[in-house]
Image: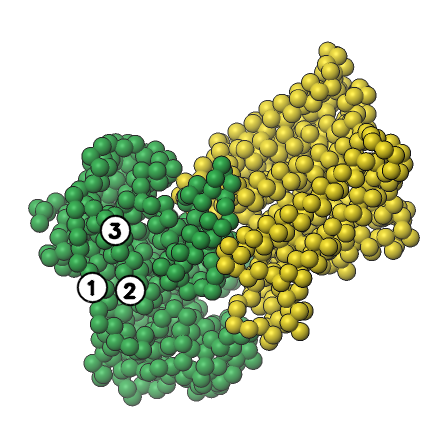
Chain colours: A green, B yellow
């Protein structure tokens, strides 16, 4: 492996934006046929480095050299780098939802026939490419009708169609469930066997450890080190140390739970899909939450966890069919979001940019948005009370921003998530439902978010955490429910929680005995 | 050096909305001066100012409602037809049933509310895009106007004409000016000073940087200067004229709606819906109700504008309100609202509307034909929005931002990406 020739060398790359040095003397050496992982906290410069490589930041806007296949290259735009066989797949997929798989694979790269596009050839080639990436679908299926995992595969097939030599994947598994992630990692190994080199950027260190040959760690726009996974005995803690520059003793803060009585209970919750009347997204789900307890919901993507949470939260998803909600021993009707907020529920959505925040707002407006009445009198918002409330949360949650007047788009993912948490803490909830609270957030910020969740529980609130990362649930939660196809299939206490058991319950309808 | 920095920070694109508005007003003044010079002083004569206000107040009233519609992420193409329809209904009703004119006005507002409820229902509760609903409304109510009025004009009574062509009465001692207008001007000066002091107080309570006192004084002095100048002009016209009644209605509406959109929960909800409707819904905002009310409010204001227009021209006709929607929409976008919703201010829209009005007026005074006026207005709209879009696409790397950067200390740049910044009006000023 070490003898493989160097495919790509980026030498002392420095990239400055006005006022900010994003990359400072960064070096990267990628060998032919390896899987090369780039790790670093958010803002460490990973994406900027890839943008320099792929020509998004064209030659001349940075200093340093890029040597690719033994030659110095100067890409003027993405097309130039793609012609050289460098294809980047972004976290936000660049697919047209209303087009078929075939059309997407050849978008901008259509095979020409005598009269326009040769769709027959395209179809044939698409089938070959789909076979290579293990995508078994009708190539005429519209991309919006397949899951995120399969869409990811379409992107990779699209890259293959361009005759890729160096494939760059930015957070490829961030939106995938465990099974799809595993499939993708297997695919990467397959790609490696075929001699295609790949660069993978990911926050999921366990995946990097499993699949990468070499790891380059960036911190604050500098190269910290390059690790050979096979030789150096690299593990997750080792990577984290490089990323944050210190040893994190534990990925989770110390916490002794103080659990009280059951105060929230859901019985036989059944909800159907908003459009197709015969599809149940929640089927007779029942669960309880105690005061001061952190309850996890584990499940594969599409298992119905988000649907369950949102339908409970003022019937924000699907069509309610049956089921009852009890709070503090009394049955409550939560028909609208306002009802839910009034009864002390809070829902932090999994997609904070799409449905969690108004990205036009500043921090203080966002933080008070869900309970404006608390800083208003007679319907008029008091700017001073608003400011003070927001400032308090900015300090207590340590939102990194000079003031609460700052726009939320300027914040990093972790800090945006803190703003969303503050927004819901501001409503004085008794039960917080946090849907993927640490998605797309770097290690340091995750640790802080975990701390906030634990503090909320210590105040006697119930916290439900929905997460696709089993280690997170196991490390954080006092009790974990597993969900499969809209039904709660099991309940595991902290002491018994292990990934294998959870995974088994997440993939079968058979109810396992409690505890 | 530090004073210039203070001035830049506090007058232009500063962090408070007050400062931004001040910058907008400053831009408008530049336009006025431009025409003042070009027309050899005709623009700022009493007679012309009074004419401008009574001629364009209904467009500005529409701009208020349109701003809220656009902020919520919709559009209303029907306002001209709704205005014309209301006008004919009111004129006809007063003629046929000899209703007293105040009842006529109430009837008109009720008609506006009904039409608004109709359009709001389709937009909010059925989910038909406002573009379609109001395009249909545009045809519906234009046709309705011609059906009811037999495509003919219907005159209105003398009393009714007050709201469009009326002036404040002459009372009190003979000062050579209209005394009530003078009083209004005085109240406005007091209001400006009170607001400045209150905003300083608020910022102090928020531990935010309070602009140096001399800036506040300068700001107040300029504002007061403009108000005093305008007051004397409006009060000092021909005897029997003053600030027109329609202008007073407009000012009252501007103040009320500015307060509503900026300071109240209901106003916040409109911005929330326009910024991200799903996020707003999940925060407990009643999406449908907000959309319904915004559309309904627009039609009520359109009805009012229609009545004022009818009152001014003393009859309702089949051609009333033609292409008003375009003027109102243009005013809102020149005033810095975002096409995608969620951004924009009432005061910005008013400034945008005044820019259009003064442009019209100045070009007419110069004897420029309506062909050229339309061409120029079209270009101004395009350039104003293009400049905003360009600024936005530059994100934080805006020209101004990068020029300022070497001088900046550790604090981050003020948000340059907001299209409400006064920079958007620069091409108009130049």
Cα separation, mark 1 vs mark 2, equals: 11 Å
Mark 2 highlights which residue? A447
Q: In this image, A421 relative to B197: left or right?
A: left
The chain carrying label 3 is A
Mark 3 highlights which residue? A459
Identified at 50% across, 55% down, the residue is B206
A474 or A112: which is nearer to us?
A474
The chain carrying label 1 is A
Would you place residue B173 above or below residue A362 in this image? above
Label 2 with label 3: CB-CB less than 8 Å = no
Mark 1 highlights which residue? A254
- Percent from the top left, x then y, of residue B31? 78, 54
A144 or A448: which is nearer to us?
A448
The chain carrying label 2 is A
Give the structural element (helix, strand or loop) at label 2: helix
Identified at 56% across, 66% down, the residue is B413
Q: In this image, A302 relative to A20: left or right?
A: left
Q: Are marks 1 and 3 on the same chain?
A: yes
- Percent from the top left, x then y, of residue A180? 27, 59
Identified at 58% across, 31% down, the residue is B296
Q: Are marks 2 and 3 on the same chain?
A: yes
Tell me the number on the disc at residue B140.
none
């Amino acid at each position: 492996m070490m003898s493989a020739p160097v495919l790509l060398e980026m030498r002392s790359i420095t990239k400055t934006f006005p006022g900010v040095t994003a990359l400072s003397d960064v070096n990267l050496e990628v060998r032919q046929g390896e899987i090369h992982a780039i790790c670093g906290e958010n803002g460490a410069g990973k994406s900027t480095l890839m943008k320099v490589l792929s020509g998004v930041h064209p030659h001349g806007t940075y200093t340093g050299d890029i040597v690719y296949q033994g030659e110095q290259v100067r890409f003027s735009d993405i097309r130039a780098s793609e012609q050289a066989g460098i294809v980047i797949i972004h976290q936000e997929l660049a697919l047209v939802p209303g087009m078929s798989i075939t059309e997407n694979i050849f978008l901008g790269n259509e095979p020409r026939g005598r009269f326009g596009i040769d769709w027959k050839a395209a179809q044939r080639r698409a089938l070959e490419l789909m076979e290579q990436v293990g995508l078994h679908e009708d190539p005429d299926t519209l991309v919006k009708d397949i899951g995120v995992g399969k869409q990811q595969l379409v992107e990779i097939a699209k890259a293959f169609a361009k005759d890729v030599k160096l494939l760059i994947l930015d957070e490829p598994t961030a939106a995938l469930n465990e099974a799809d992630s595993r499939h993708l990692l297997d695919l990467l190994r397959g790609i490696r066997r075929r001699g295609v080199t790949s660069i993978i950027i990911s926050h999921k260190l366990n995946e990097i450890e499993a699949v990468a040959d070499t790891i380059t760690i960036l911190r604050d726009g500098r190269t910290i080190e390059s690790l050979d996974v096979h030789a150096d005995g690299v593990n997750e803690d080792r990577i984290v140390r490089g990323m944050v520059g210190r040893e994190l003793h534990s990925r989770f803060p110390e916490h002794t739970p103080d659990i009280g009585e059951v105060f929230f209970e859901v019985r036989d919750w059944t909800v159907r899909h908003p459009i197709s009347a015969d599809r149940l997204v929640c089927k007779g789900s029942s669960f309880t939450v105690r005061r001061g307890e952190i309850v996890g919901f584990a499940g594969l993507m599409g298992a119905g966890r988000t649907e369950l949470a949102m339908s409970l939260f003022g019937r924000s998803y699907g069509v309610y069919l049956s089921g009852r909600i009890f709070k503090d021993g009394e049955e409550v009707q939560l028909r609208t979001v306002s009802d839910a907020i009034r009864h002390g529920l809070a829902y932090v959505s999994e997609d904070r940019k799409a449905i969690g925040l108004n990205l036009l707002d500043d921090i203080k407006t966002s933080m008070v948005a869900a309970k404006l009445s608390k800083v208003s009198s007679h319907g008029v918002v008091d700017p001073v009370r608003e400011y003070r409330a927001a400032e308090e949360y900015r300090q207590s949650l340590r939102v990194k921003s000079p003031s609460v007047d700052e726009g939320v788009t300027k914040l990093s993912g972790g800090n945006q998530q803190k703003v969303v948490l503050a927004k819901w803490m501001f409503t004085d909830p008794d039960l917080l439902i946090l849907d993927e609270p640490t998605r797309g957030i770097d290690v340091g910020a995750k640790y802080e978010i975990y701390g906030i969740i634990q503090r909320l529980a210590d105040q006697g609130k119930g916290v439900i955490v929905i997460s696709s990362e089993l280690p997170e649930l196991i490390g954080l939660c006092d009790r974990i429910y597993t969900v499969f196809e809209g039904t709660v299939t099991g309940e595991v206490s902290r002491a018994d929680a292990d990934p294998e058991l959870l995974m088994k319950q997440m993939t079968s309808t058979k109810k396992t005995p409690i505890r | 050096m530090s004073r210039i920095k203070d001035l830049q920070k506090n007058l232009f694109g500063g962090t408070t909305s007050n400062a931004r508005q001040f910058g907008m007003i400053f831009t408008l003044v530049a336009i006025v001066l431009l025409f003042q010079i070009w027309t050899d002083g005709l623009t700022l004569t009493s007679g012309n100012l009074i004419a401008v206000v009574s001629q364009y107040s209904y467009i500005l009233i529409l701009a208020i409602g349109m701003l809220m519609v656009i902020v919520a992420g919709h559009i209303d193409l029907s306002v001209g037809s709704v205005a014309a329809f209301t006008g004919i209904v009111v004129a006809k009703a007063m003629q046929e049933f000899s209703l007293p004119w105040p009842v006529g006005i109430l009837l008109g507002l009720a008609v506006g509310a009904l039409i608004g409820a109709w359009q709001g229902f389709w937009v909010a509760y059925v989910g038909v895009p406002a573009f379609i609903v109001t395009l249909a409304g545009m045809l519906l109510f234009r046709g309705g106007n011609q059906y009811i009025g037999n495509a003919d004009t219907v005159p209105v009574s003398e009393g009714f004409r007050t709201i469009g062509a009326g002036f404040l009465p002459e009372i009190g001692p003979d000062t050579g000016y209209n005394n009530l207008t003078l009083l209004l001007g005085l109240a406005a000066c007091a209001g400006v000073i009170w607001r400045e002091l209150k905003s300083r107080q608020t910022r102090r309570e928020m531990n935010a940087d309070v602009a140096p006192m001399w800036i506040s004084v300068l700001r107040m002095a300029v504002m007061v200067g403009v108000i005093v100048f305008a007051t004397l002009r409006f009060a000092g016209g021909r005897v029997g004229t003053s600030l027109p009644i329609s202008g007073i209605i407009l000012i009252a509406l501007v103040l009320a709606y500015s307060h509503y959109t900026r300071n109240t929960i209901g106003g916040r909800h409109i911005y929330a819906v326009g910024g991200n409707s799903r996020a707003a819904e999940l925060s407990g905002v009643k999406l449908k109700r907000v959309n319904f009310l915004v559309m309904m409010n627009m039609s009520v204001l359109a009805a009012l504008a229609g009545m004022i227009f009818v009152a001014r021209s003393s009859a309702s006709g089949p051609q009333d309100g033609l292409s008003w929607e375009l003027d109102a929409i243009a005013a809102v976008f020149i005033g810095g609202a975002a096409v995608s919703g969620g951004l924009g201010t009432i005061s910005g829209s008013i400034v945008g509307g005044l820019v259009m009005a003064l442009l019209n007026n100045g070009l007419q005074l110069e004897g420029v034909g309506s062909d050229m006026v339309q061409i120029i207005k079209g270009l101004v709209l395009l350039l104003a929005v293009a400049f905003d879009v360009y600024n936005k696409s530059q994100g934080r790397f805006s020209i101004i931002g990068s020029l300022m950067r070497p001088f900046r200390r550790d604090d981050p740049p003020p948000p340059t990406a907001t299209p409400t910044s006064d920079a958007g009006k620069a091409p108009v000023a130049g």
